[in-house]
Amino acid sequence: MAKKRSNIIVPAEFQQKQADRDAAKIQAFSNELGQVQSRRMELNTMLLQAAVTRDGLPNSEEQAALMTKAAMTLARNTIEADCREKWTAIRDLFAELKFEGPQPHLEWAAKKVGVQLFDEESRIIQPNEDLPAGVKVIQ
């Protein structure tokens, strides 16, 4: 037996309010992850400085350029890996808290490091949810 689906029309202003509420709910988690990430970056900076100077200061411009290039590559790779870890944790948090997209500003930042926060499907409100004024269920 085929199951009948409901089509729900959600006004754009409701979608925006819902996205704003979802963003506000997740902001505290994002801030905390940012603080953890900041602490790790401070430690990484110290480790990077130690790695670059462990053999002493460069004795030529060419050696300095090579050391700088190696340090920049290491720093870039470290930062990208750390960002991927942060956005993967946020994606997992969204799943755990049953948040659904869209969150355009967060999705944009996550995509910069190759993490997709949500499936491409748009948010579907179930008919048994409390619907705000202006939202219609069409059968």
Image (spheres, rainbow, N blue to C red):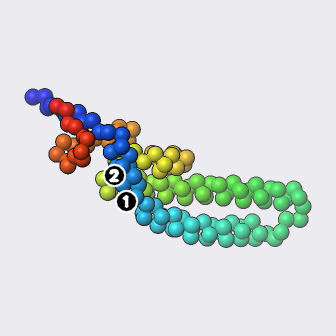
In-front residue for pair 83/69: 83
Position of residue 136 relative to residue 46, above or below, is: above
Residue 60 can be seen in this image: yes
Which residue is most to the right? 60
| 101 on left or right of 42 | left
- For marks 2 and 1, the one nearer the N-term is 1
Q: Residues within 10 Å of mark 1 (few under 14, many from 20)?
A: few
Position of residue 49 relative to residue 95, above or below, is: below
Residue 115 can be seen in this image: no
In-front residue for pair 28/134: 134
- Disc 2 residue type? Phe
Q: How crowded is mark 2: few (under 14 residues within 10 Å), some or many (20 or more)?
A: some
Tell me which corner region of the image, top left, top right, bottom left or bottom right, holds residue 58. bottom right
* Residue placed under numbered mark 1 in the picture: 25
Secondary element under disc 1, as helix, strand or loop, is: helix
- Where is residue 16? Give x, y as percent: 38, 46
Q: In which quarter of the image is the N terminus?
A: top left
Q: Residue at x 24, y 47 (%)?
A: 132
- Disc 1 residue type? Lys
Tell me the tag on residue 99: 2
Q: In which quarter of the image is the C terminus?
A: top left
| 32 on left or right of 61 | left
Position of residue 127 relative to residue 58, above or below, is: above
Q: Which residue is drawn at 78% across and 59% down?
A: 67
- Where is residue 123? Give x, y as percent: 32, 42
How many numbered discs sit on the rendered protein?
Answer: 2
CB contact under 8 Å: marks 2 and 1 = yes
Q: Which residue is drawn at 32% across and 56% down?
A: 96
| 79 on left or right of 117 | right
